[in-house]
Image: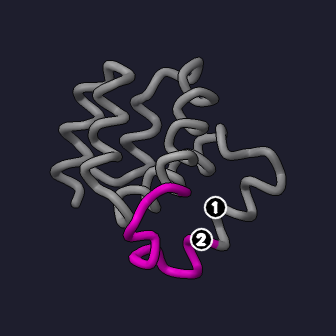
Amino acid sequence: MRYREIVEEIPRPMYVKLSEKILDALLEAKDGGNVPSSLAKTVLYYAQREQLSSVAGLTNLLNALSLADPDKAVKILEEFGLEDASIALRTAE
């Protein structure tokens, strides 16, 4: 399953809180260097436009965190009760 498909399965009312949590984790990730500069620029693009909680913004955030700290990405989804999404994310990697 692709990141966009995973995000589309998440209830939209969760997008704002989830995007904030993922962004915080991404900024704290020790392996941030694993995120390609093109993806980092895309995340910055959505952040500058206050669109990180959109489908596209959250998709790119989730992708970036999955590269920087895959275990944390899965853990955050589980914290939000998104078991199906966390399973899909584990198999997407």
Q: Left or right of 30: which side holds 12?
A: right
Q: Residue at point 43% right, 59% down?
A: 29
Location of mark 1 (residue) = 43
Q: Is residue 45 magenta?
A: no
Q: Residue at point 60% right, 37% down?
A: 20
Q: Left or right of 51: which side holds 16?
A: left
Q: What secondary structure characterizes most of the magenta part?
A: helix
Location of mark 2 (residue) = 40
The part of the image, by quadrant, that contains residue 68 is bottom left
Label 1 amino acid? Val
**Residue 38, image x, y percentages:** 58, 79
In the rendered view, would you say 24 is above or below 2? above
Q: Left or right of 53: which side holds 76?
A: left
Q: Secondary structure at mark 2?
A: helix
Please state the extent of the stretch shown in magenta in the rendering: 27-40
Label 2 amino acid? Ala
Between 50 and 29, which is closer to the camera in this rendering?
29
Between 34 and 15, which is closer to the camera in this rendering?
34
Q: Residue at point 57% right, 81% down?
A: 37
Report the Cα–Cα distance between label 2 and label 1: 5 Å
Between 45 and 4, which is closer to the camera in this rendering?
45
**Residue 59, image x, y percentages:** 51, 50
Q: Tell me if mark 2 has few (under 14), some (14-19) or many (20+) residues whose alpha carbon lies within 10 angstroms of its own.
A: some
Question: Residue 84 has which mark?
Answer: none
Which of the image's four quarters has the C terminus? bottom left
Outermost residue, right side: 49
Between 74 and 89, which is closer to the camera in this rendering?
74
Contact, mark 2 vs mark 1 (Cβ under 8 Å):
yes
Q: Secondary structure at mark 1?
A: helix
The part of the image, by quadrant, that contains residue 83 is top left
